Image (cartoon, helix red, strand yellow):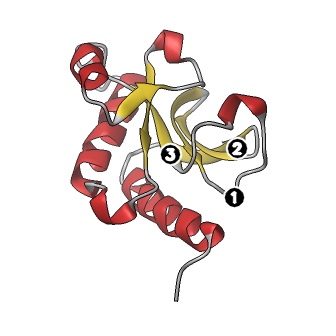
Amino acid sequence: MERSDTELDDAALDRIRVICRRFAGADEDELQDRPLFRVGRRRCAIFNGRSSPPRPRWSSSGRSLHFLADPDEISALGEDGRFTRSPHHGDRGWLAINLDDQGAVDWDEIAELLESGYRQVAPRTP
């Protein structure tokens, strides 16, 4: 039996939530009816689902993770065809990766990308 867009969105978002819960001080909120992950007021990731409410900015994103990329990795990630500039501040270092083919998603890589975004917004500890 084929799973619905909502079920596939929920499965991907559940995995992202599990990863983000490991980050001290990380919270989940919403931005434009999409799950947003942040530390304080500083954003580090947004999930866009196929069942998310339609908005022009997000219409071509499909099921995707939008994240604040490490500035030192933006060029390399940009050369990898899986990554695109995010419609959410792509001009400020945000990238997106498509999660439609969940069987092909490398969740270890997703965890690394999320941790990298988190480290950029988390308070520095001595």
Q: Residue at position x 62%, y 74% from top?
A: 4
Question: Residue 5 lies in what quarter of the image?
Answer: bottom right
Which one is in front, 6 or 110? Answer: 6
Q: Residue at x 36, y 54 (%)?
A: 22
Vertical position of residue 101 compared to residue 61: above or below: below
Q: Dot 1, how many residues are within 10 Å of its Cα: few (below 14), some (14-19), or many (20+)? A: some
Q: Earlier in the sequence, mark 2 or mark 1?
A: 2
* Residue at far top of view: 91
Residue 64 is labelled as 3
Where is residue 118 drawn, in percent x and y?
39, 34
Tell me which amino acid carries mark 2. Glu
Q: Circle 2 is placed at which residue position?
A: 30
Work out whether mark 3 precedes mark 2 in sequence or the reverse, and give the earlier one.
2
Question: Above or below — where is 70 with respect to 102?
Answer: above
In the picture, the disc for residue 51 is 1
> In terms of depth relative to the viewer, which is nearer, 30 or 39?
30
Q: Residues within 10 Å of mark 2 (few under 14, many from 20)?
A: few
- Do the CB atoms of the residues marked 3 and 2 lie less than 8 Å apart? no
Amino acid carrying label 1: it is Ser
Whole-angstrom CA distance, mark 3 to mark 1, is 11 Å
Amino acid type at circle 3 is Ser
Instruction: Please give the name of the residue rendered at 30% of the width and 26% of the height, measured from the top-left corner.
Output: 125
Which residue is at the front of the view, 21 or 83? 83
| Disc number placed over residue 41 in the picture, else none | none
Front position in the image: 79 or 21: 79
Tell whether 116 sits left or right of 35. Answer: left
